[in-house]
Image (cartoon, rainbow, N blue to C red):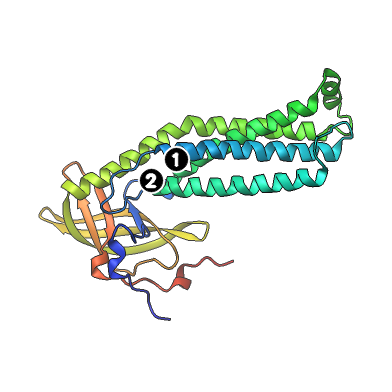
Amino acid sequence: MTDAVAPRDAASTGGWEHRPMFSATDKGSRITWLAPGRSPGRVMPRMWATALLCLVAWAAATLAGSSVLCAATSTECTVAVGQGWLIGGALVLGYLAVLVTVNLGERAQDHLGQRRAASMFYLAPLLTGITVGAAVGADLALGADQRLRQVLDGVPGTEAVLVSTVVAVLAGLWGVVVLVRLPGALRLARRRQEAIARLRREGQRYTGRLTLGRVSHWLHSDPELDVTVAYDSPGGRHEVAARMRTSPNRVPRNSSSMIVLTDLRGAVHLELDLDARPVYEPEERYTPSE
């Protein structure tokens, strides 16, 4: 198998590939990237609109699913449409909710440049929608106080109410945690991107050499490695310990040329030098075994 070589136009903003990405301060989903030539991202109005659509879609899908469960477990639970139509509607709404969520997640990652902030941004409306849909479904199925007493007594046929209530409570608690942490995650992603932009604009640039370490962990099928970047400056030789997140087909070879950007405050940003035509390790070498 031949080794992969980066195309010359890979550094252009339009075709820029953010992997591999490096961080001397963060690891895992906190590692942040910023495409060359782009300004630090922020939550745009279109993203808020998509988030609202995500919330509504998950609320509708969860309510439909709760109604299907209610109609299947209790003869007292009646709906205005047939069971087949109800199931079909729930499946369609669920599919649309997934599509909207995927679109929101991809848009958030593109703008925020960080997986953690992006995941929280789409989880917040998703969990809120599930909470609302399950709560409304449980409320509609409860009906009168007599029905509530039956649920508490565990009377057969009231399982749908119990399931919807549990889903609403669990999703609500998780959603509260996400909503509390979301502002901090957005601020961190913004600060990291601003630091990258500042170092590209004002920092001292040096050429470094990459040394690969062990795979720290896997995120799905993507490896995250401990790496070291050595470079020389007027003050002497330096080594920077960092984390590299990438995909199996974009693991640069040892001694690959690196761009090191630093300033007097000690901030460091690392990038693979695409102008040096880096060679990548064979994909199967960093593909996780099943």
Q: Nearer the viewer, mark 2 or mark 1?
A: 1
Is residue 267 something that shows in the picture?
no
Asked if residue 63 shows in the view, the reply is yes
Circle 1: residue type: Met
Residue in view at x 76 percent, y 27 percent = 140
Residue holding disc 1: 47
Q: Please identify the quadrant where the C terminus is shown.
A: bottom right
Mark number displayed over residue 111: 2
The outermost residue toward the left is 234
In the rendered image, residue 285, in percent from the top left (x then y), is placed at: 46, 71
Name the one closer to the observer, 222 or 265. Answer: 222
The image quadrant of residue 69 is: top right
Residue displayed at 41% across by 60% down: 246
Relative side of 102 to 209, left or right? right
Q: Amino acid at mark 2?
A: His
- Could you tell me how far apart the alpha carbons at marks 2 and 1 are, in whole angstroms? 10 Å
Task: Pick whichever, 63 or 152, lies toward us.
Answer: 63
Question: Which residue appears at 49% of the width and 29% of the height?
Answer: 180
Q: From the viewer's perspective, is 133 left or right of 30? A: right
Q: Tell me if label 2 and label 1 are in contact, CB under 8 Å.
A: yes
Left or right of 167? Residue 114 is left
Q: Position of residue 90 (x, y in %)?
A: 71, 44
Q: Is residue 250 left or right of residue 59?
A: left
Q: Of helix, strand and loop, which one carries label 2?
A: helix
Query: Mark on residue 191?
Result: none
